[in-house]
Amino acid sequence: MTDLPNIRLPVDLKPTDGRFGSGPSKVRVEAVERLAATGKTLLGTSHRRPAVVGLVEKLRDGLGDLFSLPDGYEVLVGLGGATAFWDAATFSLIERRSQHVVIGEFSSKFAAAVSGAPHLETPEVIQAEYGHVERPVASDEIDTYALIHNETSTGVMVPIERPATDGLVVVDATSAAGALPVDPHQFDAYYFSPQKAFGSEGGMWAALCSPAAITRITELTGGDRWIPPFLDLGIALTNSRKNQTYNTPALATLALFVDQVEWMNDSGGLTWATERCASSARTIYGWAEAAGYAQPFVTDPDARSATVATIDFDDSVPAAEVSGVLRANGIVDTESYRKLGRNQLRIALFPAIDPHDVEILTAAIDHIVERL
Ligand SMILES: *Cc1c(COP(=O)(O)O)cnc(C)c1O
């Protein structure tokens, strides 16, 4: 993009915060300030000591409250993000054969990671056309159903419903957890990284695990299978129960994560957070449907994500130029997912993002498109 048109947005078309990235996503300034205010008391202190153990405890308790976890469910934490959790699940959750509902790049990556595992059978893959939804199919051959609650690459959301079978339901909730409604009875492991709806930094994963998932983990990790310790969810379970991680965590990630969970719980919990995202979603999709030059990429209104909106532009409006001008005006990370290769903007609607800022953003886009 060498010759971007020089369009300056007037002040009333500038959101109070210009971060609309789908991950890393907006980290609340108040949370960063509270972290900075810990000064000499947190960063640079031992992760085995009370201040830090207290953070992990607050995180696990806070997530339990936020998701109203039923008795027997436990919150596991570990390092390496959702990507590391895919490998951990390959060793510690899938017994023999998994089924993967693939609706975009992230769900396809988990399927690919499992496909190479010598100790597992070739997984079954149910592949959707990108922009659309598919559902798992109950089967006697399958012991683990790998679902995704929100596909960040395409902006498609799928309600989490257990297939009629006793296989484990393992859900990538990285861009859904804390922003979309979910019933814990419908999943066995609901895992995510904190740099999306939890407005923190990357490098960690959290997994909400049902008693059935805990049993599977205990059996597989206590058996004959060779498991790299870093990917051993049995070790993660033991450490999580002591409110620690197996190896050294990023304390800043942890502190920002706890801050966001407490902010959500104090503001009205998951219902509040999901309604905030739904309100931003009504704004953005309503605007796109009314705009003469844009439309939601996802045709089924029920599948349009309330956390990551993908908006296609007519060929006459180059989306890369629009996101470039937005960026020049301090509104960043609205570019589409590169591998999807569409003339599109992708706009995050996570709880940290003020719904009013989403309204301003749509007006800013109109203003730019009129002047291209
Ligand atoms: C971002 C993302 C991931 C990868 O998360 P990392 O923390 O980078 O490992 C996986 N799944 C989904 C749905 C995501 O949005």
Image (cartoon, grey):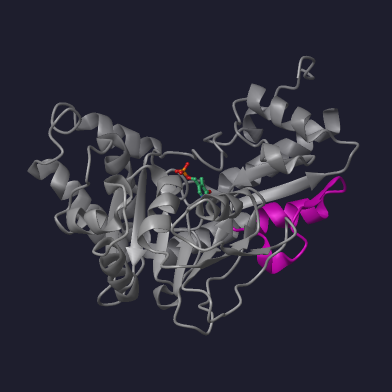
Which residue does the image show at 29% across and 75% down from the upper left?
A: 211
Quarter holding residue 337: top right
- Up the image or down, 219 lies above or below 115; here it is below
Residue 336 in view of the camera: no
Give, as a single range, the part of the protein colored magenta.
282-307
Tell whether position 355 is magenta: no
5 vs 265, left or right, is right
Viewer-proximal residue among 352 and 131: 131
Residue 57: which quarter of the image? Answer: bottom left
On the image, the x and y values in percent for residue 2 come to 77, 14
- Can you give x and y, in whole percent of width and height, for residue 41 in the image? 13, 31
Viewport quadrant of the C terminus: top right
Quarter that holds the N terminus: top right
* In the displayed structure image, the side of residue 359 where residue 42 appears, left or right: left
Q: Residue furthest left?
A: 50
Q: Residue at x 65, y 51 (%)?
A: 309
* Front position in the image: 274 or 58: 58
The reply to whether the magenta stretch includes residue 285 is yes
| Residue for point 49% across, 40% down | 25
